[in-house]
Image: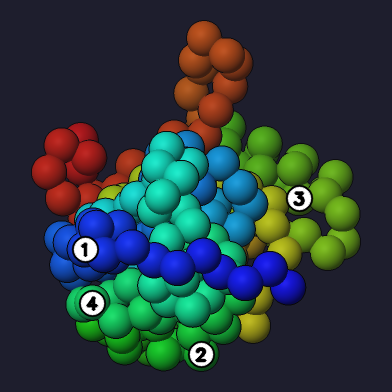
Amino acid sequence: MTEAAPLDDATRERIRTLIDSSEVVLFMKGQREAPQCGFSARVVELLDHLLPDYETVDVLSDPAIREGIKTFSSWPTIPQLYVRGGFVGGCDIVMETFASGELHETLGVARDEAQTPSLTIEAAAAEQLRIADREAPSDLALRLSVDARYRTRVLLAPPDADDVEVEASGVTLRLDPLSAQRAEGARIDLVRTARGAAFRVSLPNAPGPAAA
């Protein structure tokens, strides 16, 4: 294993300033909206699910920070997550603590008991979802995801033991517990776009303009 390069005082101070710039800071490859590696993308996905806002630092744009953060944390890989100035860990640890609920506690996000939301699926959307479900591999299920910024996705993905199952219009959707809370009263319909048909999810509980 290559020994980490010594960390000069100027770079150490820059890193500490970045860590102290926000309660939650993720050192990653790429940017929040465009991760440049699968591990960074996975951590962003989990944080997006829990938090509407947090800071990211693109280490690819700053070689001194990219190498320096490894020495600073004594952790050899990127991404790295810091919460209120403390080092949480890399991708594997973030995923493990998310699954156990420890990450929720660290971030101050309640992990309430899952509730089954009331959903409406319009006829055209229901038909397309039933087709997708019939044609999907047996290890995948229809999912509705609603992240902390109330962005939605309807997709096929592996089921999870903590999922909430909702049936509407003959379609069974699985939601993780936080998505289930945000999806109360949601309506799913099928719309035509420039790129073809797409699912549109309307969320009455979404804050601000997203509720339109």
Label 2, on which residue?
100
Q: Is residue 123 visible?
A: no
Q: In the rendered structure, are the residues bearing label 3 and label 2 in contact, judged by CB atoms less than 8 Å apart? A: no
* Quarter location, residue 124: top right
Location of residue 86 with respect to 57 vertically, above or below: below
Give the mark nearest the N terminus, 4 or 2: 4
Location of residue 2 with respect to 128 vertically, above or below: below
- Can you say which quadrant of the picture contains the C terminus? top left
- For disc 1, the neighbor class at 10 Å (few under 14, some 14 to 19, many from 20) is few
Q: Residue at x 21, y 77 (%)?
A: 84
Label 3, on which residue?
133
Q: Residue furthest left?
A: 208
Give the mark nearest the N terminus, 4 or 1: 1
Given the image, on which type of amino acid does mark 1 rest?
Glu
- For disc 4, the neighbor class at 10 Å (few under 14, some 14 to 19, many from 20) is some
Q: CA distance from mark 3 to mark 2?
A: 29 Å
* Quarter location, residue 95: bottom right
62 or 78: which is nearer to us?
A: 62
Q: Secondary structure at mark 2?
A: helix
On the rendered structure, is 176 left or right of 205?
A: right
The residue mark sitting in front, 4 or 1, is 1
Given the image, on which type of amino acid does mark 2 rest?
Ser
Q: CA distance from mark 4 to mark 2?
A: 22 Å
The residue mark sitting in front, 4 or 3, is 4
Label 1, on which residue?
13
Q: Secondary structure at mark 4?
A: loop
Q: Residue 45, how many percent across, how many down? A: 48, 57
Q: Residue at x 33, y 52 (%)?
A: 56
Label 4, on which residue?
85
Q: In the rendered structure, are the residues bearing label 4 and label 1 in contact, judged by CB atoms less than 8 Å apart? A: no
- Can you say which quadrant of the picture contains the N terminus? bottom right
Give the mark nearest the N terminus, 2 or 1: 1
